[in-house]
Every structure is written in structure tokens, then in C-alpha cells.
Image (cartoon, grey):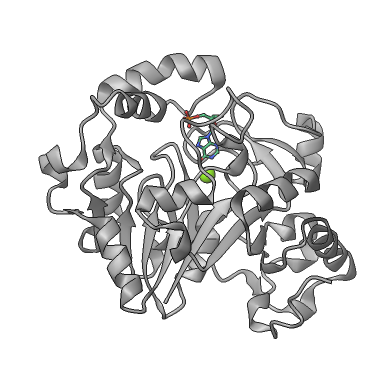
């Protein structure tokens, strides 16, 4: 049995969705369970000709075999969830925990203020978490439109592990958006490191086998708050690092890879493996490559520098937007994968 937790090591938008979708192609995985904040997250997943834009569903939509569960710590906006379920026709695969807290119109209203003050996504998550702390928020079990999907997710996933099944736990946002470990007050409304993600879905710390920390080859950030080494718009454009937010459509700010922050993220999440995404943006010759031999000297040097700085192996490398655009180094012997 194994539980792998996938979390972001920067400010969100590291490409976790793509990595989870790739891992979910493995035939031994039976469920992906989403932790994290709620519909403030945006994942874009591309498989073949299809593009999925997700804010509430776990990222393994492309694999029709896999259950898509949402843990009790996650905030659910029923409108967003139900529209995604019908758009991607996954109703029969979705399980929502009975204790998920519900985002209502009033939370969206109240988030407008936060949007102005700290650049929140305006999706109602901060106010809904505040109401949860005040114990006045509504739960999923009290919402008729969700009743066909509501169950006890924490019990289900612990049982799946007891039966020897493999599951993926999906984090959202990134380490430096954590309300505890991030750049407060420019952060999201709760902790989003691996321990919190496990708590969100109801897994105790000893049930986790791997913590896969996802780092993008450069750093991006949406909304206000510090960003060390931030580049100006022209330079971002010149390097081809320009991106827009999935949820807000805002342009993302950008800076080069920050190894000190990566190291800190490794420690805070007890990362056992690293995935580096978008390496093809730094090294275009890698676009779409799936073989370790294709790594150019300069790309290898970049990876080596990351591994040296953080002392954790880079096991998966993203080389393009499709979920199969990866170099998977876990296949190579474990001895070779030990960082020198
Ligand atoms: P909130 O989570 O909507 O309250 O927003 C707080 C901060 O976290 C803002 O800077 C948002 O842009 C950022 N944020 C929240 N969720 C994500 C995400 O999934 N990706 C990137 N940034 C996010
Ligand atoms: Mg995103």
C-alpha cells in the first residue's frame, strides 16, 4: 500500500495538476484525494487533444478508472464543483466528504475586500475558512445538491490503504502561500504544507510513504507580496516565462529558481522526491522529451545544482504541457537516484 502526497514548493502554480495526472496513469492508483484550500486553486491538465481546467475536482480526471475525492478540510463551492462534474462527465467518480465546508454568496462578497487588500483570488475561501473557525459555516452534508456525492472520505481512504491500494493525495497552492510558513499577510487562509494536506484528507502522518514536492524551473506568483529576484515584464516576456492565472486571468509575476526557498520547502514538507516542471521553458531542446538521455548538458547541470542544494533526488522532470511530457527517473535504479 502506498500514499503519495504531492505538494507545491513555491507560490502555487508549480504544475502539480500535471504531475498528479501523470502519476494517476499508473494502474496501481485507485483514487486521488484533494486537500488544500478550495476553488481558489486552478489546475490546467492537458491530455491528448483535451484540456481540463479544474478548480474543485482532483486532477486525475483524464483517467476514467480513478475515484476523485475531496477531503473534509477542503472548502467546496457547490456551483463550481457541479459545473466541473457535468462539463467533464465525472459524476459517478466523485466523492465529497460530509465535513467539507461550503462557500456561499456572502463569502464571495466578503472576499472582495481581501482581493483589494492582499490580492486574494476573490473566490470566497478566506471568509469561508473564517466562518469555519467561528463554527457558523455550512457543511456538505447539509447541501441537497451535493447529497448524491457525499460520504466519509477519510474512512474510505484509510480503508483503501488497509486493502493495500495506492492513493494520491493532492495538495493545492504552495508552501510560501501557507498562512504559517509563507509571506504573511500575502498568503492563503490556511497551512498548505504536506502535514496540513494530510490532515485535510484525514491521513495520519505515519500513513504517508512519499512526499513529492513540485518545483517549477522558475518561480511565479500571482497577487501581492514579496518575490525575491522579480523580473520586469519585458524580461519575463523575453525569457518566455509569461503565464496567466487559471482562476483569475491575472498575469503571473516571475523570478528565477530560488534554491534557498526550495531547500526550506523541502524541510517544511519533509520532501522525499522532487518534480521539476517546465524545464523545457529553460531548455527548449527538451520539449516533449521522455528519455533521460535527452537531457542536455546544461539541463543536467541545472538539475544537479538543484539536487546538490536540497539533497533530495529530482525524480520527475516536466518537458511540456501534456501529461505524458515527462522524464521519469524513478524507473532508473534506486542507487543511481541517490544524490551524491
Ligand atoms: P486566497 O487564497 O484567494 O485568499 O488568496 C491569497 C493569496 O494566495 C493570493 O496572492 C492568491 O493569488 C494566492 N493563491 C491562492 N490560491 C492560489 C493558487 O492555487 N495558485 C496561485 N496562487 C494562489
Ligand atoms: Mg494554479
- Percent across and percent down for residue 284 are 78, 61
- Residue visible at 56% across and 31% down? 250
Looking at the image, which residue sits at the far left?
144
Residue sitting at x 64%, y 29%: 183
Q: How many marks?
A: 0
Please give left or right for residue 74 compared with residue 184 in the image.
left
The reply to whether residue 89 is visible in this rendering is no
Residue beneath the point at 15% across and 43% down: 141
Quadrant where the image shows the C terminus: bottom right
Establish if 112 lies above or below 153: above
Where's the N terminus, which quadrant? bottom left
Q: Report x, y in % for residue 39.
A: 39, 39
Q: Is residue 317 above or below residue 83?
A: below
Q: Is residue 90 left or right of residue 148?
A: right
Q: Is residue 131 above or below residue 56?
A: above
Q: Is residue 198 visible?
A: yes
Q: Residue furthest front?
A: 206
Residue 264 in the image, given as x and y percentages of width and height:
71, 46
Toward which corner of the image does residue 276 lie, by quadrant?
Answer: bottom right
Residue 107 vertical position relative to residue 34 in the rendered view, above or below: above
Q: Residue at x 41, y 26 (%)?
A: 126
In the image: residue 10, left or right of residue 309: left
Give how far across and how far down residue 325 sits, in percent: 61, 69
Amino acid at each position: 500500500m502506498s500514499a503519495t502526497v504531492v505538494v507545491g514548493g513555491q507560490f502555487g502554480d508549480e504544475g502539480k495538476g500535471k504531475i498528479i495526472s501523470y502519476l494517476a496513469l499508473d494502474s496501481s492508483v485507485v483514487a486521488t484525494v484533494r486537500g488544500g484550500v478550495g476553488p481558489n486553486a486552478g489546475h490546467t491538465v492537458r491530455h491528448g487533444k483535451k484540456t481540463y481546467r479544474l478548480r474543485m475536482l482532483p486532477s486525475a480526471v483524464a483517467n476514467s478508472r480513478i475515484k476523485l475525492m475531496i477531503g473534509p478540510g477542503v472548502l467546496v463551492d457547490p456551483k463550481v464543483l457541479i459545473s466541473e462534474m457535468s462539463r467533464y462527465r465525472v459524476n459517478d467518480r466523485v466523492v465529497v466528504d460530509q465535513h467539507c465546508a461550503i462557500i456561499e454568496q456572502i463569502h464571495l462578497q466578503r472576499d472582495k475586500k481581501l482581493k483589494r487588500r492582499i490580492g486574494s483570488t476573490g473566490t470566497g475561501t478566506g471568509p469561508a475558512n473564517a466562518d469555519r473557525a467561528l463554527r457558523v459555516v455550512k457543511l456538505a452534508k447539509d447541501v441537497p445538491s451535493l447529497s448524491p456525492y457525499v460520504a466519509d472520505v477519510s474512512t474510505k481512504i484509510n480503508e483503501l490503504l488497509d486493502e493495500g491500494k495506492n492513493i494520491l493525495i493532492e495538495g493545492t497552492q504552495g508552501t510560501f502561500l501557507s498562512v504559517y510558513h509563507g509571506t504573511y499577510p500575502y498568503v492563503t487562509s490556511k497551512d498548505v504544507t504536506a502535514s496540513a494536506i494530510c490532515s485535510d484528507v484525514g491521513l495520519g502522518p505515519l500513513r504517508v510513504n512519499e512526499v513529492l514536492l513540485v518545483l517549477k524551473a522558475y518561480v511565479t506568483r500571482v497577487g501581492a507580496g514579496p518575490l525575491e529576484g522579480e523580473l520586469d515584464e519585458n524580461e519575463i516576456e523575453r525569457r518566455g516565462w509569461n503565464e496567466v492565472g487559471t482562476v483569475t486571468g491575472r498575469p503571473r509575476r516571475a523570478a528565477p529558481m530560488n534554491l534557498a526557498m526550495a531547500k526550506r520547502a523541502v524541510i517544511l514538507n519533509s520532501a522525499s522526491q522532487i518534480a521539476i516542471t517546465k524545464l523545457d521553458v529553460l531548455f527548449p531542446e527538451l520539449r516533449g522529451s521522455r528519455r533521460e538521455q535527452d537531457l542536455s548538458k546544461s539541463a543536467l547541470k541545472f538539475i544537479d545544482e538543484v539536487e546538490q542544494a536540497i539533497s533530495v533526488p529530482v525524480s520527475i522532470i516536466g518537458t511540456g504541457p501534456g501529461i505524458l511530457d515527462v522524464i521519469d527517473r524513478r524507473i532508473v535504479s534506486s542507487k543511481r537516484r541517490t544524490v551524491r
